[in-house]
Structure formats: structure tokens, C-alpha cells
Image: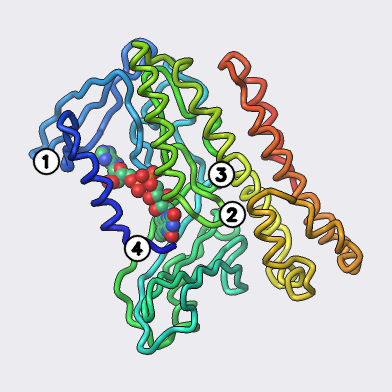
Amino acid sequence: MAIDRLKYGQRLLKSLVDYPWIKVYSKYKVVETLIKNDKVIGCKIRKSDGKHVNIYANIVADCSGVIGIVRRNLNPKVTSKIPNKIQKHETIISYREIIKTKTKHQYQKQMRIEARDELPPPGYFWIFSKGIKTLNVGTGWLINDQNKHVNVKKSLIKLRKKFFPDAEVIDGAGDTLTGRLPLYSMVANGFIACGDAAALVNPISGEGHGPALLSAFYASIVIEKAIREQRSDERSLWEYNITIWNLYGYDGGLGVAVQKLLNAIPFSEFSFLFEKGIITQKDVDAIMDSYNAKIPVVGKALKLLQRPKMLIKVIKTLYLAERIKKLAQQYPEDPDYFAKWQKKIIRLEKKKI
Ligand SMILES: Cc1cc2nc3c(=O)[nH]c(=O)nc-3n(C[C@H](O)[C@H](O)[C@H](O)COP(=O)(O)OP(=O)(O)OC[C@H]3O[C@@H](n4cnc5c(N)ncnc54)[C@H](O)[C@@H]3O)c2cc1C
């Protein structure tokens, strides 16, 4: 489904304005996280006139996107479970354009995400139909040593000219997204992270709006309960970690595994799987929904025997995603067991395909 990003944002804002106790300060910028002892107690704000003011809160929710402005200023006294910085190799660089074609385009009501030889692995190219003559096209890739110098905007322009030579560009924008598993923990004393600030973008599709909205919803439930119990400590917010890891652990795991696969074998090899009918759209849907991740390899392994290396890599990919999913569902109920769990998940993340 394609949404109008501006209207969507405005609708969310409007729904807040209905509550008389909510104040929206659209020109305020968070510049610092206020911490007292081992707890987040608010934020230092820069107003549009340049003056600073402190705003205090029982619980601060960081919804500032990939920048994670509150999260990045946490210190080890508050928590050692949350990283301040998202590493470069866990970041996707992306650029997209809204374009208008002269005549009715051939991708009506389609959303396509494709790997292409023109892009550095594990790059992907998307074509989302937004109307009879309008499309959202973009490209992106998880940054690694080989692709870090490739210009993402130029890469998209090249593809756009190839696929839509006559199109008019209405808008273009680029940014970074997180391309990793959700943060191992997203809560601390007086603190909770949602959306991109919690690294919830799907590493395969780059979808982040859904997780941002849903994580905020689940955060609100946990925050309300904690406030009613007059608490704001890490333990009172911990349920959020369990919910989010259950929801997005598999997506993240599959994403991490598929990125490794795309890095390990070139797209031309990968497309063999589809051309020979070893993997079909039905299989991809099954894998994405995780109701039977073994489908493509079990019944069709014989066809893949011509390429045993690939067979092993595909099996390893699905197996890794399943193992991450299993561990995601075993997220520790108690913060005291976190360190042991974290060790296991990091070990899985480091596995080679
Ligand atoms: C090129 C590109 C294309 C994408 N395409 C899609 C797509 O097709 N579908 C999809 O689902 N996702 C897409 N995404 C991802 C999606 O945009 C994000 O995952 C989503 O917007 C995350 O929502 P969020 O609320 O967590 O953060 P954001 O939408 O980034 O919102 C963060 C907000 O915090 C504000 N902020 C930042 N710093 C401060 C500060 N210091 N003080 C106060 N406020 C601050 C920002 O102004 C912003 O309003 C795309 C991303 C990119 C870069």
C-alpha cells in the first residue's frame, strides 16, 4: 500500500491535538539527554530563537528516527544494554524519487523489490506504483567495505533512466536507515526507544513506517502501565522488549541472513533460483511470513544439486533466520538474564553464510 507521507504525518499529529493535555512543540529541537544518577529525567531543548530550556519527564520516548538523539546521549550509568551509535555496517544508505511518466506505466498496483547487477551487493531497487502515471522508485544497500564509496543517488538515476527514460522527477530524497536486528534492549530507567531509534526497519524491504507506528503503540501501553504504578525503571518497561522482539525478531533475522546471502553470491547466481522455479513467489511469501521456511529447499533440492554451494548457502540462510527467530521468542523475561541472551544473539549474528 502506498501512502501520502505528508498527509499520514499530519493525520497522526491531528489525532494528538484532540487531547487537551498534549502540547506539540514543532520547532523545539532536542540537543541533550538529561540524566540524574542512573535515570533519564528529561531533555535539553533548543528553541527556534536559539534559547535553551529543560523539559522533565517520568519517561522519555525516543522517536527521533535513525539519529536516536536521546539514545545516543545515554551513558553507562543509565544502561550498558543500549548502544549509543548504530555502526556503519548496520546502516542502509538509500535514495528515492517520486516520478511521473508521460503515459500509463506498466507497473499498475505493483510493488517490486529487485536485486540488480547494476547495484553493488547487497543492493536492491524498488518500484512502487503510486498511481496511473506516478511511481516511487528507489535504491539502497547495507553499507560494507566494497560498496561504501558507491554513490546511491547516481545509481538510482542510472536505473531510473533505464526503466523510465521519459519520466519527470517530482521529488527526490535520500537518507540512512538501520539494517540490523532490533536493538537488543530498547528500554532503560526513564527511557524507551521506538521506530528507527530502536532499529526496527525491516532489513530486506526497508519498511519502517509500520514498525514505527506499532512500536509506538506498544510503548504507549507499557508506559501507561508503568506510570499508573508510579514506576519508570527499566524493569517496569521490560515487557516492551519482549513484545518487540517477538514481533520483529524474525523479520530482522531473515533480513540479516538474506543480506549475508546476497553478499556471498552474485545476483546472477541468485536469480537462477527463480528462473529454474526452485523458489517461487509463493515460497518467498512463506519465508517472509515464516510459516514454512524450509519449502524452497526440501522438495526441490534435486534441482539445486547442480549448484551444491548455492544449496548449502540457501539452507544456511533459512536455518540462520529460524535460529534467530527462535531466540527472539526466548527473549529473557527478566533483565538479569539479558547478558546471557545477548551473547547468544551476537554469536548468531556473526555466523557466516
Ligand atoms: C529514502 C527512504 C525511503 C524509505 N521508504 C520507505 C517505504 O517505502 N516504506 C516504509 O515503510 N519505510 C520507508 N522508509 C523508512 C521510513 O522512512 C522510516 O523507517 C520511518 O520514517 C521511521 O519512523 P520514525 O518515526 O521512527 O522516524 P522518522 O520518520 O525519521 O521521524 C523522526 C522525527 O524526529 C524528529 N527529530 C529528529 N531529531 C530531532 C531532534 N533533535 N529534536 C526533535 N525532533 C527530532 C524528525 O524531525 C522527525 O520528525 C524509507 C526511508 C528512506 C531513507
Mark 4 lies on residue:
173
Image position of 89 with respect to 71: above or below: below
Labels 3 & 2 near each other (Cβ < 8 A): no
Cα–Cα gap, marks 1 and 4:
25 Å
- For the point 26% across and 57% down, the residue is 7
Q: How many marks?
A: 4
Mark 1 lies on residue:
48
**Label 1 CA crowd tier, 10 Å (few <14, some 14–19, many 20+):** few
Q: Residue 314: percent from the left, percent from the top?
A: 78, 56
Q: Which amino acid lies under the numbered mark 1 shown in the image of this protein?
A: Ser
Q: Secondary structure at mark 4?
A: strand
Q: Earlier in the sequence, mark 3 or mark 2?
A: 2
Q: Which mark is residue 180?
A: 3
Mark 4 Cβ inside 8 Å of ligand 1: yes
Cα–Cα gap, marks 4 and 3:
22 Å
Labels 4 & 3 near each other (Cβ < 8 A): no
Q: Is residue 158 visible?
A: no
- Quarter of the image where the N terminus is located: bottom left
Q: Earlier in the sequence, mark 1 or mark 4?
A: 1
Q: Secondary structure at mark 2?
A: loop
Front disc: 2 or 1 = 1
Q: Which amino acid lies under the numbered mark 3 shown in the image of this protein?
A: Arg
Q: Which amino acid lies under the numbered mark 4 shown in the image of this protein?
A: Ala
Judged left or right of residue 280, residue 196 is left
- For the point 34% across and 11% down, the residue is 230
Q: Earlier in the sequence, mark 3 or mark 1?
A: 1
**Label 3 CA crowd tier, 10 Å (few <14, some 14–19, many 20+):** many
Query: In the rendered image, which quarter is residue 112 located in?
Result: bottom right
- For the point 46% across and 65% down, the residue is 152
Q: Which amino acid lies under the numbered mark 2 shown in the image of this protein?
A: Asp
Mark 2 lies on residue:
145
Labels 2 & 1 near each other (Cβ < 8 A): no
